[in-house]
Image (spheres, helix red, strand yellow):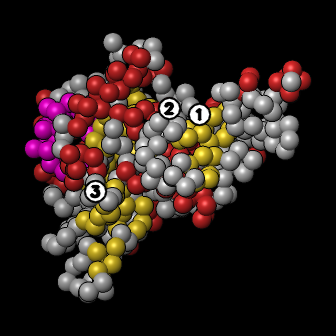
Amino acid sequence: MADLTTNFIGIKSPNPFWLASAPPTDKEYNVRRAFEAGWGGVVWKTLGSEGPPVVNVNGPRYGAVWGADRRLLGLNNIELITDRPLEVNLREIKSVKRDYKDRALIISLMVPCDEDSWRDILKRIEDTEADGVELNFGCPHGMAERGMGSAVGQVPEYIEMVTRWVKQHSRMPCIVKLTPNISDIRKPAEAAKRGGADAVSLINTINSITSVNLDSFSPEPMIDGKGTHGGYCGPAVKPIALNMVAEIARSAETRGLPISGIGGVTTWRDAAEFMALGAGNVQVCTAAMTYGFKIVQEMISGLSQYMDEKGMTATSDLVGRAVPNVTDWQYLNLEYVTKAKIDQDACIQCGRCYAACEDTSHQAISMSDDRVFEVMDDECVACNLCVNVCPVEDCITMVELPKGTVDARTGKPVADYANWTTHPNNPSVKAAE
């Protein structure tokens, strides 16, 4: 059986699945339920200093984007950091950690950008026995307007400065949580590394407005007729998160910097993809909020089975496996050629492939009078659009052509790879004739 135990920057947990800093980790009751369900770790919802009280809205805090079947694709939240007293949070953290010593418990922090504020809060959390701290440099709303969150995360110099303070005034491992609301994610990661960060976590939420109410003409969620930008998360942000994780993992300046992957992790497969791109573990929020804490059990069993099938005995066998295969466009092999192939037995004759190709692509699919759809090899540029719009899995596939295979009449590659040995355009077949 694969061993899912992880040792992330010296922090051990029974599996790589942690709950991200968010509403699900705001109190002892939630965190205990999460650990009982099987989560390997938790990042406690962001704590602030004892300055002006944090006051959250008492109206809707979430906007949503749904798929056609009302499956939740993304959440937009306008919630701030914890509004519970610091002393209460610290007491609960200490209580939970005392009873779950085998689980990772990280404290997320966000305080004003001055050394005294950081020194003070670090001193106050030392005796909780928490395993580490995560610096929240990503929140794009509310706190950013107060000079914290993404207002810090968008300035590499501030990231480096605050990280140095934390490493100077604390014995605890330090994870820097990065904002995606920036043009080049490598720059803040490099700053965190210069400041002495033990790891980075990403991505935090994406600045967004998910919808507008067309009766009241206000962004949603709506508070007394007004709306604001918030932080977007959930399955829809996963492609953005994967790219940013990969950029850090393969950059010469940040290569080797441990990464905790965040952004749309819903299944074991999502987690495996993050880990293959360099993440040592993953953090989850929206999936837990959608399906409940027990979803982690499916993640654990799925990842374990996958690793067994691949002959992997430890999570370290998976971490970073895909990084060498991530490259820039100019290094792609332009001599690699594929063609689309339609499985007529699987085809339901819906015509989506034909409509998409005929109207918006390369007019490479023909339709007969009795609605039989076939790929015209001479026109197919292997764009893969037909595969993506087809509602039947594996009905349309991309078939790789042998190197050097060409159509004798057109000089273009031949798509009939499976029957190439008997294809009439095969030079050896022509010669035999």
Image: magenta residue range: 25-45
Cα separation between marks 1 and 2: 7 Å
Residue 376 appears in the rendering = yes
Q: Quadrant of residue 428?
A: top right
Disc 3 residue crowd, few under 14, some 14–19, many 20+, Cα 10 Å:
few
Q: Residue at label 1?
A: 323
Q: Secondary structure at mark 3?
A: loop
Q: CA distance from mark 2 to mark 3?
A: 30 Å
* Residue 65 shown left or right of residue 83 in the figure: right
- Looking at the rendered image, the quarter that the N terminus falls into is top left
- Does label 1 or label 3 sit earlier along the sequence? 3
The picture quadrant where one finds residue 267 is top left
Residue located 33% across and 58% down the image: 67
111 or 186, nearer to the observer = 186
Question: x, y percentage for residue 255?
Answer: 60, 36
SS assignment at label 1: helix
Q: Which mark is residue 69?
A: 3
- For badge 1, the amino acid type reads Val
Distance from the alpha carbon under mark 1 to that under mark 3: 34 Å
Give the crowd class for mark 1: few <14, some 14-19, many >=20 residues within 10 Å. Answer: some
Q: Are marks 1 and 2 in contact (CB under 8 Å)?
A: yes
Q: For mark 2, give the secondary structure.
A: helix
Q: Any magenta on residue 28?
A: yes
Task: Answer few, some or many: residues within 10 Å of disc 2's Cα (few below 14, many 20 plus, some between 14 and 19).
Answer: many
Looking at this rendering, what residue extends furthest in the right direction?
A: 431
Q: Quadrant of residue 268?
A: top left
Q: Nearer the viewer, mark 2 or mark 3?
A: 3
- Where residue 386 is drawn, which disc sits there? none
Pointer 2 residue = 276
- Is 126 in front, or is 98? 98
Q: Which residue ends up furthest to the left in the rendered image?
A: 29
| Residue name at image x 43 percent, y 32 percent | 272
